[in-house]
Every structure is written in C-alpha cells, then in structure tokens.
Amino acid sequence: SGETLDTLAALKEAKARGAKTVAITNVVGSTISREADRTIYTMAGPEIAVASTKAYTTQVIMLQLLAIYLAEKKCVMNKEEVAKAINTLYSIPKKIEFTLNKIEEIKPIAETLKNKVNGFYIGRGLDFSIALEGSLKMKEISYIHTEAFPAGELKHGSIALIEPGTPVVVVGMQSNLLEKTISNIKELKARGAYIISVGRENDHELKSVSDNFIGIQDIEDVFSGVLSIIPLQLLSYYTSISKGIDVDKPRNLAKSVTVE
C-alpha cells in the first residue's frame, strides 16, 4: 500500500543514517513513494482483496529485476546471462496461465482441508520462503492454523506434531535439494501425514510419494517461487470458499497497517 507505518518508520530510520532508499510499491503517490529516494512501481492494478496475491507476486518479480540489474552492473552476470534471465521472466505469465487451468484439480484438495484444524508447510532453500507465504495465506483467509518449517529441521522436534491425517503442503522446486525433501516426505508419510506437494509437472518421483500433486511448468530454480506460490494461493482461496468465508474481507485484517 505504501502506507504501512512500521515500514515507513524503517525507511525514515535508514534515511536518517545516510542510506539511499528504494521503494517498491503498487500505489502511485503513496507516502512511501514520496519519502524514498527512488521508487519502483509494480503496476499490478487495484487489488480488492485484503490478503495480497498479485501485489505479492509483482513485488517478487520487481526484486528479481533489481537483482538482475545490479548483477549486470557489478559484472556478476554477462549480457547473455542477463538476456536469458529476462526471457525467463517474460515466460512467467504463460506459465501462470497453465497453473490457473488446474483449478479443477485444486478444488477437491481444498475440500479435504476445509475441516482441518492444523496443517504444516515445508520446503528447503528458496522453497521454504514460499512455504512461509503459503502458510500465511492459508491462515489469513481460511482461518486454519498452519505453520511453515524448513524441511531439514523437521526432526529437531517439529515432527512430533505429525499425527495420522495431518495435512502437510510440500514445495519441491529446488533441484539440488529435492532428494532430501523427498526423504522428508517419506518420514512424514510413515507417521501418517497427508502430503500435498507442488513441483514440476514431470517430477514423477515427487508425485509418487504424494497423496495430492500439483504440477507446474518447468522454470529455473531461482525464479521458481513466482510460479510455486500460485497453486498455494489458489489452495487457500478455494479452502476459504469451501468454508463459506468472504475471501476478500477476512476477519481482523486491514489493507494498510497504520498503527505500530
């Protein structure tokens, strides 16, 4: 929104200490866009729902574009690598459209979740960050208590919470960590967990160890979060719908947090 008070306070503190500031926001003329030294607008258009979806996704893409720009300026990436990364970002809308066409697959999964009280999300590396956002969305709009854990830390106590029928949503998009994530899934299933996984559509091994599998199109690991969050947003949405909740106006939430 560009009006969140604690974010504005952090911006002012940074400027007071001599830092140069860049704001990424969706709202032209918002307070944060006026206070920052530079502003990048996501141009996502108005978002009616209180719980952010497209604003979140466009912010992630803007951060990736900023990272690519800085990598080019610092000669960390050459022109060919930059061009390849930009082309990958250009391909994302079509890949998202592919995921949106899986709505009829996602609705029955949401039905299995609507009466659950607790659930968990896991992932490794960048996938854990997506698990955190997916868990937050499920809490925000369906009111089901969910927590996200790094998959590699499950055996340090969290696995004690797993009992027969406990839903666990797994994000499995980081190729170099996938083998270990699948090992975690097997441990969870041995304790009765109900596994819902998100991975590449041709990942037959991940699919084989899951009770439900949502396949998305292939993409480089570093950009995968923009795609893997979409089925998690849809899962939260349809779980909320199945419970008869007004998705656009979840209880106790406001679009802008204007008090500290």
Image (cartoon, grey):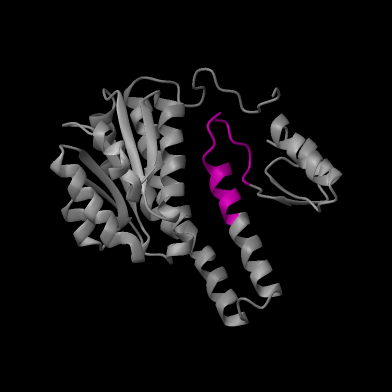
Figure check: 244 above or below 212: above
Residue 201 visible in rendering: no
Q: Quadrant of residue 47?
A: top right
The residue stretch that appears in magenta: 44-61
Q: Residue at x 45, y 21 (%)?
A: 246
Residue 71, x across and y down, in percent? 64, 71
Q: Residue at x 63, y 63 (%)?
A: 67
- For this rendering, which residue is in front, 117 or 247? 117
| Quadrant containing the N terminus in the rendered view | top right
Q: Is residue 70 magenta?
A: no
- For this rendering, which residue is in front, 106 or 123? 123
Residue 190, x across and y down, in percent? 13, 43
Q: Is residue 46 magenta?
A: yes
Farthest front residue?
Answer: 156
Q: Residue at x 49, y 57 (%)?
A: 93
Figure check: 149 above or below 84: above
Mark count: 0
Residue 157, x across and y down, in percent? 30, 37
Figure check: 116 above or below 179: above
Q: Residue at x 71, y 40 (%)?
A: 27
Q: Quadrant of residue 122?
A: top left
Residue 31, x across and y down, in percent? 79, 36
| Quadrant containing the C terminus in the rendered view | top right
Residue 158 visible in rendering: yes
Q: Quadrant of residue 141?
A: top left
As drawn, is 21 to the left or to the right of 101? right
